[in-house]
Image (cartoon, rainbow, N blue to C red):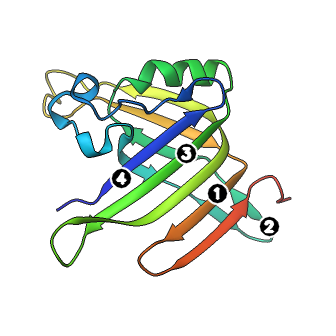
Amino acid sequence: MAHSIYMSLTGNKQGLISQGCSSIESIGNRCQLSHADQIQLLSFKHHILCDKNVNHLPVTLIKAIDKATPLLGVAISNQEELTLVIDFYRTASHGRQEKYFTIKINRAVIVEMFIDYPHSVTQSEVQPEEVISLRYNDITWEHHAAGTCGYSFWEDRV
């Protein structure tokens, strides 16, 4: 079974952007009522490099087109500051999904956003996706199952 990722997304101007994003109206038969106010992520990528100094690179998210898509367009246009809470789920030993890891990202701004709608004839089995990259002020990681956590600040680095 695939691991699941859900994200709560709040803008400092628009409020809870992820509200209703996992509803049937937003994503059709892939709806998850237990995560109604979160965005289902298909992929999450985060890179930090360190040679002599720590270098944070933008976080990249891939998601389905949903009710947040137009609001994210507004957010990038207005350079709106965003707060992201990303919850990672895995299958526990009892067979149910458990939230085992959370990443919180503060004061994020979208730096790139595009929709990848595949060719309808040659790639008919591929679903449309939205790709979003964000830079941020700070990031926190918490492993709930193991009881560890850590954080890093982007702007404190040279």
Lower sequence index among marks 1 and 4: 4
| Residue type at the position of mark 4 | Ile
Image coordinates of residue 22 in percent, x first then y, are 30, 35
Q: What element does badge 3 sit on?
A: strand
Lower sequence index among marks 4 and 2: 4
Image coordinates of residue 12 in percent, x first then y, are 66, 30
Whether residue 132 sits left or right of residue 53 in the image: it is left
Identify the residue at horizontal 62%, vertical 62% (top origin). 140
| Residue type at the position of mark 1 | Ile
| Residue type at the position of mark 3 | Leu
| Total marks in image | 4
Lower sequence index among marks 1 and 3: 3
| Disc 4: which residue | 5
Which quadrant holds residue 52? Answer: bottom right
Q: CA distance from mark 1 to mark 3?
A: 9 Å
Image coordinates of residue 154 in percent, x first then y, are 75, 55
| Disc 3: which residue | 84
Query: In front: mark 3 or mark 2?
Result: 3
Image coordinates of residue 124 in percent, x first then y, are 13, 28
The answer to the question of whether label 1 and label 3 lie on touching residues, with beta carbons closer than 8 A, is no
Front-lying residue, 144 or 30: 144
Q: What element does badge 4 sit on?
A: strand
| Disc 1: which residue | 139
